[in-house]
Amino acid sequence: SRENTHMSSQSTKLKISYKPLWKTLIDKGMRKQDLREKAKISASTIAKLGRDENVTTAVLVRICEALECGLGDVAVLERRPSQENISQ
């Protein structure tokens, strides 16, 4: 989409990861489908979460409400590998 292309030209040192979300789901004995239904989010949003792509804060709030957890149980910021390390 349009807003993503304008943002991707900026190099950021941090990226969002939803690894904590998948651990939280396992801890609560839930599947992605259960989360979709309980948080009322679309399959495409689940796919974005699976690819660590941007979703709206409203979606994150709905997930936190559905799982009765905090934002840290859903997402974390991770450091991107630096360009020098990638080219070696």
Image: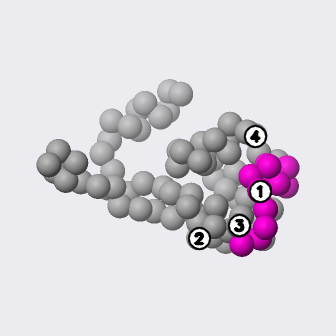
Question: How far across and down, in percent of the image, does residue 67 sit?
Answer: 77, 66
Mark 2 sits on what residue?
A: 72
- Cα distance, mark 1 to mark 2? 19 Å
Instruction: Name the residue nearer the viewer: 81 or 65.
Output: 81
- Cα distance, mark 1 to mark 4? 14 Å
Mark 1 sits on what residue?
A: 31
Mark 4 sits on what residue?
A: 42
Residue shown at the point (54%, 45%) measured from the top left: 51
Q: Amino acid at mark 1?
A: Arg
Q: Amino acid at mark 4?
A: Ser
Position of 31 with respect to 72 (left or right) is right
Q: Which residues are magenta?
A: 27-38
| Element type at mark 3 | helix
| Element type at mark 4 | loop
- Cα distance, mark 4 to mark 2? 22 Å
Which tag is nearer the camera, tag 1 or tag 2?
Answer: 1
Q: Upstream in the sequence, badge 3 or badge 2?
A: 3
| Element type at mark 2 | helix
Q: Upstream in the sequence, badge 1 or badge 4?
A: 1
Q: Upstream in the sequence, badge 1 or badge 2?
A: 1
Q: Amino acid at mark 2?
A: Gly
Q: Upstream in the sequence, badge 3 or badge 1?
A: 3
- Is residue 2 depicted above or below 32 in this figure? above
Question: How far across and down, in percent of the image, does residue 44 sit?
Answer: 68, 36
Mark 3 sits on what residue?
A: 26
